[in-house]
Image (cartoon, rainbow, N blue to C red):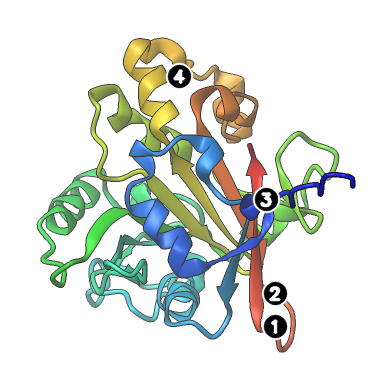
Amino acid sequence: MSESVPELKTPEFKKWPFDSFGQMLKVSGSIEPNIFPYKVSLPADSEFFKNAYDGIYKGKSVTVGNSPGVHPTIKGPFVEHMAVLAADNMGQVMISKEVFQGNSLQDLTDYSQEKLHEHEQLLNKLPLPLGWRRFGYIHSHPIDDVINSVTFPFGRSPKIGGLNVTFSYGDFESLLEPVKHSYKRDTTLAVITPVQIAFMVLTKKTFDVVGRNPKAIDTPSTIKRFMDFPPYKDFEKLGVLLYAGNHSGLNKKEIDLQRLIY
């Protein structure tokens, strides 16, 4: 009688629920990259996505930097907004009620480096509900980011559904800079655009590689800064993961987040 062949189990290729993903994001700086799932399901009607799209992208939840007269001409989805990400013991992801508003088409920090620093200090002291753990930030890219999504279709930027993922070099730099000092609290940066949501995630490998050699993160050339793309080719070497999914489309019930950098 021939021996039965054991069933091959590959749970990492199954689509994970968003709450399970949230459990990993809370402690991603202590987890190896290969442990993370390849697909994640984000319900389009979830509280998290509604807060991300309406509150962050559209700017309906802005509480900081929105005083009368500060932004006389450009508001809502035409500027960047930013808030803290945290998750509870069950992996439910929360967006903070304190939301910072920028004042330019593309640069949140154009509002004021000093004001942004003050806001970050405020968010650092933000009291979270019992059992919640902060793990990063979420910010928006404005309506003109649609142009960036379809620009350079043959470029090297990762794509999801034919659209470029539109993190900037500044996004990458701000997330990686604290790693040089072994600072592990903010290990995820999410971006929400008119058509896309994406997550840049640091892992244990990131801290191991950069901890041994802080210069592993290249100083960007003028050309890199001009092109404004993160060094995606180095993500695998640095243990940085990238997830993205397109949320545009009528009656979409689920957003498929794909792991684009392995």
| Residue occupied by mark 1 | 252
| Residue occupied by mark 4 | 217
- Calculate the distance from the C-alpha at mark 3 to the C-alpha at mark 2: 30 Å
Mark in front: 2 vs 1: 1
In-image side of 123 versus 138 (left or right): left
Which numbered marker is on residue 10?
A: 3
- Calculate the distance from the C-alpha at mark 2 to the C-alpha at mark 1: 8 Å
As shown in the figure, which amino acid type bears the numbered disc 1? Lys
Judge the density around disc 3: few (<14), some (14-19), many (≥20) Cα neighbours within 10 Å: few
Q: Earlier in the sequence, mark 4 or mark 1?
A: 4
* Residue at point 39%, 32% (across, down): 204
As shown in the figure, which amino acid type bears the numbered disc 4? Ile
* Residue at point 21%, 65% (across, down): 132
The kind of secondary structure element at disc 3 is loop
Judge the density around disc 1: few (<14), some (14-19), many (≥20) Cα neighbours within 10 Å: few
Q: Earlier in the sequence, mark 3 or mark 2?
A: 3
Q: Earlier in the sequence, mark 2 or mark 4?
A: 4
As shown in the figure, which amino acid type bears the numbered disc 3? Thr
Task: Give x and y (percent) for residue 242.
Answer: 57, 45
Q: Nearer the viewer, residue 132 or 225?
A: 132
As shown in the figure, which amino acid type bears the numbered disc 2? Ser
In-image side of 94 versus 252 (left or right): left
- Calculate the distance from the C-alpha at mark 4 to the C-alpha at mark 3: 33 Å
